[in-house]
Every structure is written in structure tokens, then in C-alpha cells.
Image (cartoon, rainbow, N blue to C red):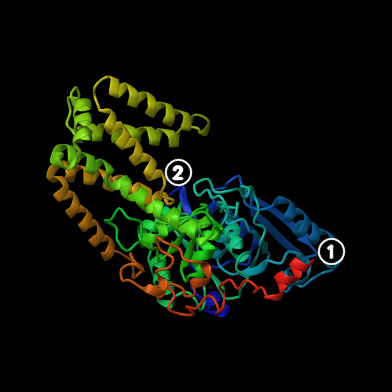
Amino acid sequence: MSFLKKILKKKKSVKTGGDRSGQAAFIPEEYFGNNLDENVKKIIETLGNSSDIIIRKMEIGLTSRIAIIYTDGLADDKLIDNNIIGELLTKESMDETISEQHSLHIIKGKLISISGVKSIYDWDQLFHSLLSGETIILMDNANEALSISTVGGEKRALTEPSTELTIRGSRIGFIERIRTNTSLIRSRIKNPNLWLETMQIGKVTQTDVAIMYINGIANDKVIKEVRKRLKRIDIDSILDTGYIEQLIEDETFTTFPTLYITERPDVVTANLLEGKVAIFVDGTPFVLTAPALFVEFFQAADDYYFRFDIATGIRLLRVLAFIISIIAPSIYIAATTFHQEMIPTLLLITIAAQREAVPFPSFVEAVIMEVIFEILREAGIRLPKAIGQTVSIVGALVIGQAAVQAGIVSPAMVIIVSITAIANFSTPSFSMAISARLIRFLFMIIAATFGFYGLIMAILVMFIHLCDLRSFGVPYMFPLAPFTPSNAGDTVIRLPIWTLKQRPRLISQKNIIRSGKNQEPHPPKQTASQPKKENQE
């Protein structure tokens, strides 16, 4: 819509429900009026005369009156004082009488030394800019305003992520400032095809949400689907990426995460280079990437910084630990309850001797110990760091030993639960680890009811469910199901980097070649005459 249409469009002024003072909240007209004092008054009334809204009126030249408005704590005070107010008061050109019709254009083009200056024409733009940390300049007899980029305020320093520790690799993690987070990706991918789209989601919070992808690599269908799902969100507030995750995921009734979440810039960079889309939310250091694959949750950033044989061994160990964390208690329950003949005789005699004084069946033992350990783990997370780990370790040791001595549980059950908990910690992704914790209880109930037959059927149903899941249309078990040999080299195993020549086909589908030929090592060949020369010397 052109500016002329905006001016001619009918203006509306309505009143709605009461505000915190008990008076009706004022919703201003859609476009600015010509009177500076009335415009400032509307801003004050709409924001409830908030004390953090700073308004300074000034006279520049001989006839022009302006108002400089910003939000204390969100805007950079020093930048405003030095580069806006200071510039306007010291410019000799403003000592002359300037036509009011062109004053804003002169300020925008000549008198402001900050690069981010734009014109705005309606109240929605004004309030969004003002509450985002930008500075607003209003002028008498002007139907537009200037928005100047002065975002500042306090922000957390760039530190190492606390939830994704690595041996090698970057020591920088995302913070709560969305522009800082996107700049961390820009510094790693210096390519003009790295595109960024920003939108506001949340009727009340108006949270900045951005999607980032590499044009020409990312799948256009995935980009459109991500954009479509974000735009159809109709909710009051977006406070974290968890809100976005729950509102755009393919399947709600599943314990497995269908979007990948990380706070490491190098992980997001690697996912973008595979053709995925990253979703940033202002106010949180966690970033979503889509589509997500099941094998992705067992990969860590430093897998690509070590040799392929070391990375492969560690990945296989993680998968083994994940399987143990799901079925270890269930196997013990099924074996001791229904299938004692499968246990070696000496081990069976030992377990029977331990359980002689225990009044509960194996299932009740397992439930008691698992619930106690989950309580200790949750307490360790919520307590201050100085005592959280101590409480978890000491509590587990003391309670486990006391429970054995009291005859409530057997020593074998304590060992099983401890191994299960340690194996659960080996999963790099917390969202996948907590999924395993929930599935474990389900498998325990099935094993206590049907034994190994029910456990095997439950495992088959879980695999069928995994194969049925989709993440933005991409099969969750890709490239294992459907099996794609060209992309199978970076799954639970990792082949040498020079062999990973293609991007995941079902994710990118464009520009799938990511490395050239002859990348394998080529050591120099030793000539036959060289050893003779060395012997002569």
C-alpha cells in the first residue's frame, strides 16, 4: 500500500478493556497526526505512563520541534546522547530556519551519524520499534517518524554452552540476543546465499522469530512449510523455542523429538550446510533446526573434529548406551520373573540369595529405585550448582546402601538401575535422553506383564513408530529407512570426511555435491634413489 493510500485511509480510535490503573486502555489511530504534543500524549497513554519510556522534547533550528523517545534499559543511552542528541545540538546547519516539511529528511540524511535509520508511518511500527530498543524521533507537522537503531542494554557474555560440552571445537555458545546469535552464524558462513527472514509471533509479546537457511542448498518445500507453520501460530506469547517446537512439530503424541535443539553455533552451521532450516527466537540461547533425523541425536559436534575411527567407536558406544538405558531394567524384570531358565545357574543362585529377604517382586523393586533416582536427578538440576552434584551423588550412594541394608531392594537391582542411569547420561541430546527415560517405564510394565515376548513386541512397535514418524515430510529414520547408501556414511558410523561427498538427498535435493574429487590423502612417493643417497651420506 502506497503512502498516499495510508494517509487517505480512514483512521480509527477505540477503547478496550481496563489497564492496570482501572481506566480504559487507549488504542491510538493507525497513522500519525500532525500535532507533536498529541502524538506524544497518545504514546504516554498507550504505554500507561510507564516510567522506563524516556521522552525528550527539543527545538532545532528556529521553528522545528521534535521529540526523542526511547525505552530505558533496551536502548544504548551513550549512543543516543553522543550520536543523536549531541549531533542535533551541535550541527551548525540546524541554526538556520529549515522548512518543517523537509526537517525529518534533513535529520535522516545529514544530521544522524548512525547507519540504521528508517522512516515509519503507523503506530504498530512505532511501538514495535520503540519496545525493541530503537529510538523514535517525532516532529511537529509531520506524518511520519524516524526509527533509529540504538539497541543496547545488558547482555550475557559469549561463553561455552553448559549443556553441550565438547573436547574439541568452539567454546562459544548462543546467548539470549537474537541478533548476536544470527551474527555468530554469519561469521562462520560468509556467503550471500545465507538468507534470514524475521517475523513477530505472539499477540502480546510480539517476539522476534527468525528463520535462516542457505538459498540454493535448502529444500524450497521445507522452507515454505516452516514459514507456513510459523505464520499460522496464533498465541499470546512466545517465551522460548519450546513454544515453537510444540506448535510446529509433525507429531504431538510421541516421546521422540522431531526437531533438533542446540545452543552451539558450529552445530547450527553444519546443519545449515546440509540443507536444513534454523529457527531463532529472541530471548533464548537455544536454536531449532529442521528437519531432524533420529541418528542426529546421537552425534556430537566433536565427532567431526576427531579421526573417523575414533568418532565411529564413540557413536556406536552411544547407541549401545541408549539401548541399555531403555531395556536394561526390563530385561532384568522379565528374566527374574518369567524366564529364570535363561539365567546361568551360578548367577541365578546369587540373585536368588540376594532376593531372599526382599519382600517385593522385581518390578516393584525397579519402580522404587527408578523413581527415587529420578527424584534425585531432578533435585540435582534445581539445586544450586555448588551443592546440586553433591546431593545427587551422595543421595544415590546413601539411599542405595540404606535400601539394600534394610532389605527393600537387592544389590543386583541397585547395579542395574545405576548402569541404566549412567548409560542415559551418554546420550548427547537431552531431549532424546528424557524420551528414553519415559519409554523405560513403559517397557518395565510390559516386561512385568508379558515377559520377553511382550518386551520384543514392544521393541518392534517402537521401531515401527520410528519409521512412521516424519519431520517436515522427511522420514525420521533416514538414511537408514529408507536406506540410502550415498548418505549412510554419516549415521551411527562416520566414514572419513573426504568420502562424505553428498548432502542428505531427502533434505537438500539441490546442490547435493559438497566436496570435490581427489580429496583423499596423497602422501608423496619416495623415489628408489633416495635411500641410496641417505646411506651414502
User: Dot 1: few (<14), some (14–19), or many (≥20) neighbours within 10 Å?
Assistant: some
Label 2: which residue? Answer: 22
Image spot of residue 59 (x, y percent):
77, 59
Tell me if residue 345 comes above or below residue 353 in the rendering: below
At label 1, the amino acid type is Lys
Indicate which disc, 2 or 1, sits on the residue closer to the N terminus.
2
Please name the residue shown 71% across and 55% down the image.
57
Label 2: state its secondary structure. loop
Label 1: state its secondary structure. loop
Tell me if residue 531 comes above or below residue 201 in the rendering: below
Image spot of residue 379 (x, y percent):
40, 33
User: Dot 2: few (<14), some (14–19), or many (≥20) neighbours within 10 Å?
Assistant: few
Tell me if residue 431 comes above or below residue 482 in the rendering: above
- Residue at the far right in the pictured view: 92
Whether residue 203 is visible here, answered yes or no, is no
124 displayed left or right of 395: right
Label 1: which residue? Answer: 91
Please name the residue shown 39% across and 58% down the image.
245
Q: Nearer the viewer, residue 286 or 476?
A: 476
- Which of labels 2 and 1 is toward the front? 1
466 displayed left or right of 456: right
Residue 482 sits in quarter:
bottom left
Please name the residue shown 32% across and 64% down the image.
250
Instruction: Give yes or no for contact between labels 2 and 1 (Cβ–Cβ under 8 Å).
Output: no
Whether residue 490 is visible here, answered yes or no, is yes
Q: CA distance from mark 2 to mark 1?
A: 45 Å
Image spot of residue 285 (x, y percent):
52, 52
- Residue at the far front in the pictured view: 536
Q: Nearer the viewer, residue 129 or 437?
A: 437
474 displayed left or right of 314: left
Image spot of residue 257 (x, y percent):
35, 56
At label 2, the amino acid type is Gly
